[in-house]
Image (cartoon, rainbow, N blue to C red):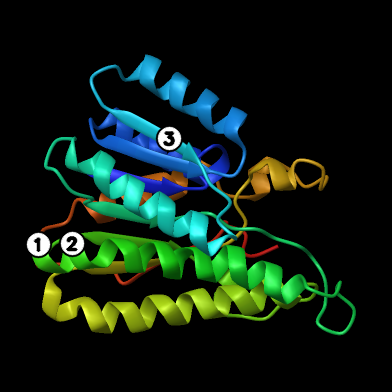
Amino acid sequence: MNIIITGASKGIGKAVAEKFAANHHNLILCARGALPLYNTMEALQTAFPDITIKAKPVDLGNRDQVREFGNWAIQEASLMNGGGVDVLINNAGQFVPGSIHNEAEGALEQMIEVNVYSAYHLTRVLLPAMMERKSGHIFNMCSVASVAAYANGGAYSISKFALLGFSKNLREEMKPFGVKVTAVIPGAVYTDSWSESGISPQRMMDVNDIAEMIYTTSQLSAGAVVEDIMLRPQLGDL
């Protein structure tokens, strides 16, 4: 299969890329920072020389860049095994803490652009070919903040609620076309953003937990789809 992963240079995105690569699937990766992205691509290509990996730096908050990446990815995938995009993982996201009444001006626009619009615009570029083939799988990286409000969540939580709504609506639309849609709804996962929190990594989930669930879900038969994947730390949300 040919897999697109956004926000693939670190954290969950990188773990998901490693999981698919280890199982011999080709990758098309993007992230905002060029150096971490290309370092990730090089490391994966060295570890898994039997697959094809392509990468392109993209500002996922920029609609034009997102669309350009989508068209570039389609072209690259056409040269790979199978000739099309089989799985899209809309993983890119951004978190800025704050409350609605006091967060910085523009916080909502920023969160919506990165966390929602990037998935919306990239998906729209890739959908026509999936619909024509009557196959494909789209994963949207939501959050427990998509289903329950929490203190200091503000614009981030609003954007994640919107992303879950997008996933649910897209799922209904794609049923007749054989295209699967899965919302991934994790609680706290230990990534770089938690490194200075003072909270033990053992209190959170590991990125590989999320990668394992996404990969397993992608391997189901054409007649089955996991609509929502909700994972939480064993001791509950932070």
Q: Mark 3 or mark 1: name the one nearer the start of the chain.
A: 3
In screen coordinates, is 18 left or right of 236? Answer: left
How busy is the neighbourhood of tag 1: few (under 14 within 10 Å), some, or many (20 plus)? some
Q: Which mark is residue 133?
A: 1
Residue under label 2, please give it. 129
Asked whether disc 3 touches disc 1, contact meaning CB atoms under 8 Å apart, the reply is no
Residue type at mark 1? Arg
Residue type at mark 2? Ala
Tell me residue 132's x, y (percent). Answer: 11, 66
Image point (82%, 77%), residue name? 99
Viewer can see residue 62: yes
- 60 and 23: which one is in front? 60
- 31 and 191: which one is in front? 31
Asked whether disc 1 touches disc 2, contact meaning CB atoms under 8 Å apart, the reply is yes
For numbered disc 2, what is the local secondary structure?
helix
Residue under label 3, please give it. 55
